[in-house]
Amino acid sequence: MIFTELIGQLPKIADALGQLRTQAQNYPNLIKELQKWGLDPTQPPENPDAIYAWSIVKYYQEFQGMQLMIDLLGEDEIKKTFVEKYNANDLAKFLKLAKDFIIRRGLWREFGEKKLDLRAEIQKFSSVYTQVTKWTKSPLQVLSDPDSTKISEYSPYPKEFQALIQNKIESFRGREFVFKQIQQFIDRNSNGYFTIVGDAGMGKSTIAAKFIWDHKFPCYFNIRSEGRNKPELFLESIRQQLINRYWLQNAKDDNLQTLLQKVSDNLLDDERLVIVVDALDEVEQEDRDKNLLNLPTTLPNKVYFLLTRRPYIADNKRLYTQGVPEEELDLRNPEYGDLSRQDIENYIWFFIQENPKFKDSLRKWIEERQIAAFTFVEQVAEKSENNFMYLYHLLPGIAQGEYNDLSLEKFPKGLKEYYQTHWRRMGMDTEPKEKMVIILFILVEISTPIPCEMMAKITNQDEYEVEKVLDQWVEYLKDQKVDKKTCYSIYHTSFLDFLKGKRDLKKTRKLFDEVNQKIAEYFIREMA
C-alpha cells in the first residue's frame, strides 16, 4: 500500500466512515471503495498494513490539527520503522529515527514553528495503534459502538493531579517574569535546581501548574491534607511518569538517580527534562540527613528540577548538592513587587470583564456603589497585598453578595485578615457555632480525608447536620472518593494554617482539647 496516497484521501475516507456508521447497508459501493485502500470495514484488521492504515484514519479523526504528523506517518519509511520498533518495544529508538527522517527532509524547523511535540505525538499515535491491534470486531462494528469510537484521550499529566492542574490554570494571568527566569536558568546551565519561594497564596502552585500545562513535564504536588507528601509516594509517581513518557525499559524498581540517567541518555539533542515538584514545605520525612524527597545531590545533563516552597530557615532547606547549579526566585522580593501588582490587577480585571460566572455580579456591585472600575481594581489590589489566594476567596464572595454590607474601604487587608474577617462574619466565635468549629477542627487534627459518617460519629451528631456544616464551608474543603465514600479535607494549606493558629487563642483552645478527646474516644470505640 502507498500510504502517502492514503493521506491524501483521509477527508474523503472520514466522510465515508461517517455515513457507514449509521447506514452501512445503503452504501455497498463505499465499502468497496474503502477496501481498495485496505480499509475493510466489514472485517477485523489482520495484516500489518491494514492495522497501520486504520490507525492513521483513527489518528486523523482524533487529531486533525496535526497535519505535519499525519503526513509523516504516511511515509513508507516511517511506517516500516514504526511497526518494527513498536513490535520490538523500542519507541525511544523510533523517536530518534523519526527525527532524523524529518531533518533529512528539511522539515524540522516547520515542526518547531508549529510547536509540535514529536515525542507526544508518537505517544498518541502508538496508543491509537495499540487500540486498533486489539480490535476483535470489524471496524464498522467498532464505529457503530459509541463506547468504542473515541480513542482514550492522551494525557501527559498524571491522573492524580490532572484536575488540580486544570483548576489552577483556569483563571491564570501573568507571571511572565517568573517563566522568563526559569527559561534563562535552563538555557545557562546543563542541569540544575530552580526554586520558587513565596508566602501562602502568592501563586506558587499555580505557577507550577501553568508551567506543567504548557510544557507537559512530569510533576508531583505535595498535599499534606491528603497524605500525599512522602518520599516513597513521590518516587512511585515520578517513576511511572518517566517510564510512560520516555519508554524506559526494566525500570520499575529503579531509584530516582538511575531513572534520571536513563532519561538523560535517551533525550533528543534539543530536549530537556524538567521535573516540577510543588510545596516542598509540606513534605513529611523522618530522615533529616537526606534531601527532602531524597532528591539527588547530582543531576545528569539536560535534567532539571523546578521546586516551589514557602520561606524557610537555612536548617530546613535540605537540598544538599555537589556542583549542581542552584537558583532561587523569591516572590516576596521588592524587585518583583510592581510586576506582581500588575499581575494581581490583571487577575481582577479578568474577573470583572471575562469570568463567565462572576463578571455580571461584580459589575453590578461596583455600579450600585458608583465606584469606577479602575478604582475598584486599584483598591482591591492594594488590599490583597499581592496575594492571589485573597482574591480567589474575596472576588467570588463579593459576586455572591457576602460583602453587600461592607464598603470597599472596610474590606479585610491581606489573606490572614480575610480569614479572620470571614470567621467572625460567620459567627464562629459565638457559642451556637461551636459544633461547626468542632467539625472544622476535626479536619485539622485528623489531617487526612475522612467521610461525613466518621465526623458524625466523633461529634455524636446526625450525618445530615454535619453535611449542612460542610456545605457552609464548601469553598475551603476538598471532597474526593476514598473506597467509594466521599471524604473531606481542608483544601488550601493557608486556611489549614489559619485554623491551626486558633489553638493559641484561649477561647478555642478548649475546643481543640475537646476535639482531640472526641477523636480518641471514637477510635477506642472502633477498636473495641
Image (cartoon, rainbow, N blue to C red):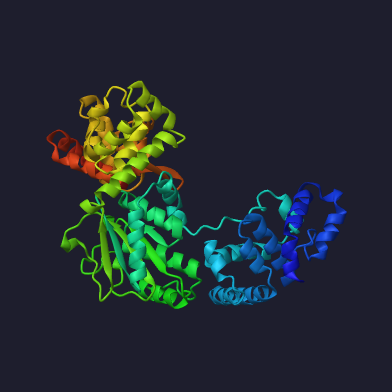
Residue 271 is situated, as x and y percent measured from the top left of the image, at 45, 70
Classify 93 as above or below 448.
below
Relative depth, front residue between 101 and 306 = 101
Q: Quadrant of the N terminus?
A: bottom right
Residue 470 seen in the current view: no
Q: Position of residue 517 (x, y in %)?
A: 21, 40
Task: Report the residue at 19% width, 57% height from top.
Answer: 312
Q: On screen, 411 above or below 2? A: above
The image position of residue 526, as x and y in percent, is: 32, 45
Camera-side residue: 526 or 410?
Answer: 410
- Identity of the residue drawn at 30% across and 64% down: 194
Does 432 sit above or below residue 193? above
Q: Position of residue 272 (x, y in %)?
A: 42, 69
**Is residue 64 left or right of 282 when viewed as pictured?**
right
Residue drawn at the location 31% of the way across and 42% of the way down: 389
User: Toward the viewer: 134 or 262?
Assistant: 262
Q: Is residue 245 above or below residue 93?
A: above
Res 154 seen here: yes
Total tally of numbered discs in the picture: 0
Would you say 96 lies left or right of 369 here?
right
In this rendering, position of residue 376 left or right of residue 84? left
Q: Quadrant of residue 458?
A: top left
* Left or right for 228, reference 418: right
Res 293 quadrant in image: bottom left
Q: Residue at x 66, y 53 (%)?
A: 148
